[in-house]
Amino acid sequence: MTLALHQSVVGRPLADVLKAGGVVGAGGAGFPTWAKYQTPHKTLIVNAQESEPGYFIDKWLHDDKATELVDLLAWLRSWGVEKTVVAAKLKDRQSFARMEHAAGLSTGAARMLDCTGRNRHVLADQAEPVLFAYTDDKYAFGMETALLLIVAQQKIPQGERPSQHGFIVSNSETLWNMHQVMTTGKPVTHKFVHVYGAMTAHTFRQVPVGTPAAVMLHDAGISLMDIAERGLVVVDGGPGWFERIDPATAVVSRRTNSILVLDPTEVDLAKKDVLAAVGKPGYPRVGTVFSTSPTPLHTDRVRLPLVDNAALKAVRPATPSVAVGARVVVGDVVAVANDDGISVPVHASIAGLVVAVDAGGITVDAG
């Protein structure tokens, strides 16, 4: 199989395609992906280190979309990447069986590296273009710097980027979004998101970007009133690192992995705006219903953020290009990339009427 590029992207620089498609780091950072792919680097690390006990985005993608992802990796080798390392946890290896087969692990075209315990490997010594590196079940390995140290023996000094050392690190869903932009010509308008935590239901949904958190919480069987009465804390992210959000106003961005509902007695509130879970295993407790594959969830209103992660100082918000009263369809550009710094455009995720435009975002109502 080969990657069948959409006619609209043929012959264009990869960075331009990813920028126009609104691809950002879907694993939680929200950094514009095009900035990582301006020129080829020697090694691509696929960050599939899904640590959260009830999250399945990475595992589902590598199982259900194995062939497509392997095709993308092959295309990236033709673009200039010499070696790809799919880095996951050994406990999750079964979810990568189809991808291992598609990449040719059984034929010797790919190789499995055991990076558990004290096992370490020099990537330059591996002849195969695709490697599957399986690690211990440690949450910290989801961080780029920790992952590079474990699977590539590469230490990234503080203040420096992996690209300065010949590495690109991309999350699994980010690569899937790259594949879709390159093969369909359509921009990123939807996100895979979990709702998880201190309630009975667990949901795994594909939703329009800008879907209100309140809609997703209601879908999971918990209301804003329930949250307030129980004194629960709602965050965007996973148990290891996340940001506290107001469930009444927050929305799904292109970087949102999960809306996590926590009992305040089980979180550390010491850090300003950022919480760190106490780390009690098996959270949430008995009664959780796990969803291991996504189902669509629709909404009649979206609020499209102009920047996915305001904490990234190098990233600039997009500039609105529509006015109140404009009619849009899914995929229409509603905000253009800011030329002053690293930025990406924003696209309509539902069809409807623009009802608000301000410095924080663009609101679209269906109908």
Image (spheres, grey):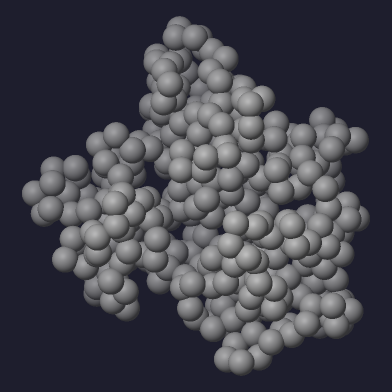
Q: From the viewer's perspective, tell me whether residue 74 is left or right of residue 44.
A: right
Res 187 seen here: no
Q: From the viewer's perspective, tell me whether residue 347 is left or right of residue 214.
A: right
Residue 215 drawn at (x, y percent): 31, 39
Seen in the picture, residue 174 relative to 111 is either above or below; the reply is above
Look at 48% across and 78% down and name the residue there. 138
Viewer-side residue, 254 vs 330: 254
Quadrant of the image for the C terminus? top left
Res 46 seen here: yes
Which residue ends up furthest to the left in the rendered image? 229
The quadrant holding residue 130 is bottom right
Residue 108 drawn at (x, y percent): 86, 82
Residue 345 drawn at (x, y percent): 61, 28
Q: From the viewer's perspective, tell me whether residue 305 is left or right of residue 185.
A: left
Image label count? 0
Which residue ends up furthest to the bottom in the rendered image? 118
Residue 295 drawn at (x, y percent): 47, 50
Look at 51% across and 22% down and name the residue there. 351
The quadrant holding residue 163 is bottom right
Quadrant of the image for the N terminus? bottom right
Look at 46% across and 73% down and name the residue there. 139
Viewer-side residue, 22 vs 287: 22
The quadrant holding residue 87 is bottom right
Q: From the viewer's perspective, tell me whether residue 206 is left or right of residue 263.
A: right
Seen in the picture, residue 50 relative to 355 is either above or below; the reply is below
Seen in the picture, residue 144 relative to 76 is either above or below; the reply is below
Look at 66% across and 57% down and name the residue there. 161
